[in-house]
Image (cartoon, helix red, strand yellow):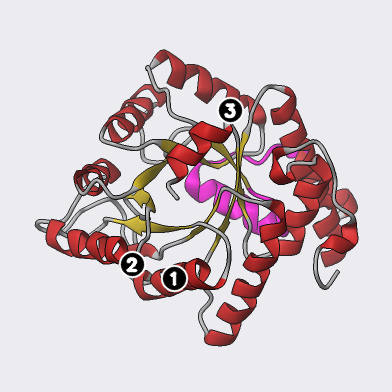
Amino acid sequence: MKIGQTIKERGASLSFEFFPPSDKAGEDRLIANIAKLGILNPTFVSVTYGAGGSALKNTRQVTLRIQSETSLVPMPHLTCFNRNRDELKAILEDYRSLGIENLLALRGDLPEEAEKFTPSKDSFCYAEDLVQLAASLSAFSIGVAVYPEGHCESPNLEIDMNYAKRKIDAGADFAMTQMFFDNRYFYDFIERSTKAGIKIPIMPGIMPIANINKIREFGKKCGATVPERIIQRFERFGSTTEEARKVGIEVATEQCADLLENGVHYFHFYALNQGDVIFQIVNNLGLQNQEPKRLESSAWPGA
């Protein structure tokens, strides 16, 4: 089932993102949690990919297990940083042969030791190149990433939007944003994208905060602003792990409620492999099955 067509038919979407665990036991727990989320009827679940291609094997393995062991639609992430056309085509053809119909096309993060983006000889340089290659196979619904506050390497928002438009025009049929915590950035981005002629669905990427200090550090690296009002809220009420979890659920619920009130019908949650947290947020909002109703709290198996 191709995501782009499903979103078009539903006019709405609910999706979750997970990362591949480093061992078999962790992978088994993840698959069990992902299967539990089937009760929420998500459009798809995505599986992240390591910098420099380090996680291709793990991403592929988790993607195939979701496909064979659950009722959900998987979407692997694929980065093109330091991979050439033949390598990437082989990966895409492998996915196609296995019946994987959806893909998130990314350039990929730079290795920690790299000071600037310097692709190796013959490697692809941008997500746009990967989108073009994937689209040429006529086998995938292709998603891309966009940045409400601008990509951290873009000199300004105009140039950032130009790159977003180019990779979308190359063959993407939906997009999801980097995390953001002030909805004004998302609304401004949607306004800019509309003026640029972008017409595909754009899903806000929602990151429930579990550890405010880690989120602040990550935000500085990727250019995502954490408002002071949220920081203070965690400082006042999130001194223990359980209290921080509760505040994180409340903050994400309030953020999504505002998006709903402003006509947003697409939601992509960065789950950090915490299915119970995502379940609670979605349940608070009544987003499951895109219907205004709530499940009983005990509906989450093991609660």
Tell me the mark number nearer the camera, choosing from 3 and 1: 1
Which quadrant of the rendered structure holds the C terminus?
Answer: bottom right
Give x and y (percent) for residue 99: 35, 62
Q: Give the range drawn in magenta.
A: 207-229
Q: Can residue 83 be seen in this view?
A: no
Q: Distance between the residues labelled 3 and 2?
A: 38 Å
Tell me the mark number nearer the camera, choosing from 3 and 2: 2
Question: Which element carries disc 2, helix, strand or loop?
Answer: loop
Residue appearing at x 19%, y 59% in the figure: 89
Give x and y (percent) for residue 40: 71, 52
Q: Amino acid type of disc 1?
A: Leu
Q: Amino acid type of disc 3?
A: Tyr
Residue at the spot of label 2: 98
Residue 203 lies left or right of residue 293; in this view the side is left
Residue appearing at x 58%, y 68% in the figure: 70
Pick the front one: 125 or 18: 18
Q: Is residue 35 visible?
A: yes
119 w.r.t. 172: above or below: below
Residue at the spot of label 1: 64
Residue at the spot of label 3: 185
